[in-house]
Image: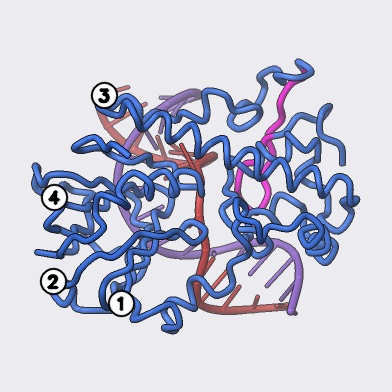
Chain colours: A blue, B purple, C red
Amino acid sequence: MIMPASYKAFAMPELPEVEVTRLSFASAIAGARILHASLGKPLRWPLGLEVQALVGRQVRAVRRRGKYLLIDLDHGLLLVHLGMSGSLSFGPAVAAAGKHDHFDLNTSHGLLRLHDPRRFGAVVYAEDQQDPRAVKLLGHLGVEPLEDGFDPLVFFQGLKKRQSPIKQVLLAGELVVGVGNIYASEALFLAGIRPTTRAANISQPRALRLHQAIRQVLARAVAQGGSSLRDFSNAQGQNGYFQLEAMVYDRAGEPCRSCSGAIKRLVQGQRSTFYCPRCQKP
DNA sequence: AGGGTGACCTGTCGGC
DNA sequence: TGCCGACAGGTCACCC
């Protein structure tokens, strides 16, 4: 895989954006030695280790679990979450840290930098994945939607036990991880299911359709993120590539791309939800 | 135990 | 132009 010398990852951190970010620097940073590390303003949680203690360690690999990136070191690992506004860049260390750059990992292969204006993101150190600090963040997470473990029937059975609206069950991430506010609306549109429908009331055929829709919408976004990344030499690529073809997200009042009826917005759990009343049945 | 709410923090946008 | 409220891609801690 050919990587541009320097790039900025997308700041729209649902699973696809996190995965695209991972793919963009994982191979480039593998094997790098940490030369210097520094923190800016406090993030959501403390690192849990004197930051200088990272110096001299080696980066082995970068994995992803849900919306967390796991940076494996030769000793311990870093759990990186992008929160609502975080993005990672990796490349030659050109500029000094800016106002919203809150974590720098300067390595023999380049500088990994976390930029996060709202600071809902985090970098947490753990000795291993059994470390209580890692378990607290990862332990309750549901299955990975793009892996074989995401079984349609198990998904259906999980839905049957939940009384909450399906939109909120998806966002909770306990059945399946990685579906954020945008893709939850999009997947429910594809499946023709009203976001307010109680999860337990969804029939098996509709649950299977939703299972497919989740995979489809996430896989497509990863693929498109990847293709956007290729010509990332112009920084324009940062603009929300997914929204160019969102079916419902952020389209309140606009015509449904399928039936031309007006897209509606509602609020569930203090988050915006968008749906087509005609195409999506309760 | 599941389900609902508040909290964290900064930036941007629209209305008056 | 300035001020103010609403809203933004997440999720944990806390209540009942």
Compared across the picture, whether A36 is left or right of A31 comes to left
CA distance for labels 3 and 2: 33 Å
Q: Amino acid at mark 2?
A: Val
CA distance for labels 3 and 1: 36 Å
* Sequence-wise first label, 2 or 1: 2
Q: Is residue A264 magenta?
A: yes
Compared across the picture, whether A99 is left or right of A189 comes to left
* Sequence-wise first label, 1 or 4: 1
Q: Amino acid at mark 3?
A: Asn
Q: Amino acid at mark 1?
A: Gly
CA distance for labels 4 and 3: 21 Å
Eyeballing the image, is B5 above or below A55? Answer: above
**Foreground of the two, A106 or A239:** A106
Label drawn at residue A97: 4
Which of the 4 image quadrants contains residue A232? top left
Question: In which quadrant of the rendered image does the N terminus of chain A lie?
Answer: top left
Q: Chain of mark 4?
A: A
User: Where does label 1 land, which residue?
Assistant: A76
Question: In which quadrant of the rendered image does the C terminus of chain A lie?
Answer: top right
Are labels 2 and 1 on one chain?
yes
- Asked if the residue under mark 3 is in contact with the one under mark 4, i.e. CB atoms within 8 Å, the reply is no
Label drawn at residue A55: 2
* Sequence-wise first label, 4 or 3: 4
- Asked if the residue under mark 4 is in contact with the one under mark 1, i.e. CB atoms within 8 Å, the reply is no
Instruction: Specify few, some or many for label 4: CA neighbours under 10 Å numbering under 14, 14-19, or 20 or more.
Output: some
Which of the 4 image quadrants contains residue C4? top left
CA distance for labels 1 and 4: 25 Å
Label drawn at residue A234: 3
Which of discs 2 and 4 lies nearer the camera? The answer is 2
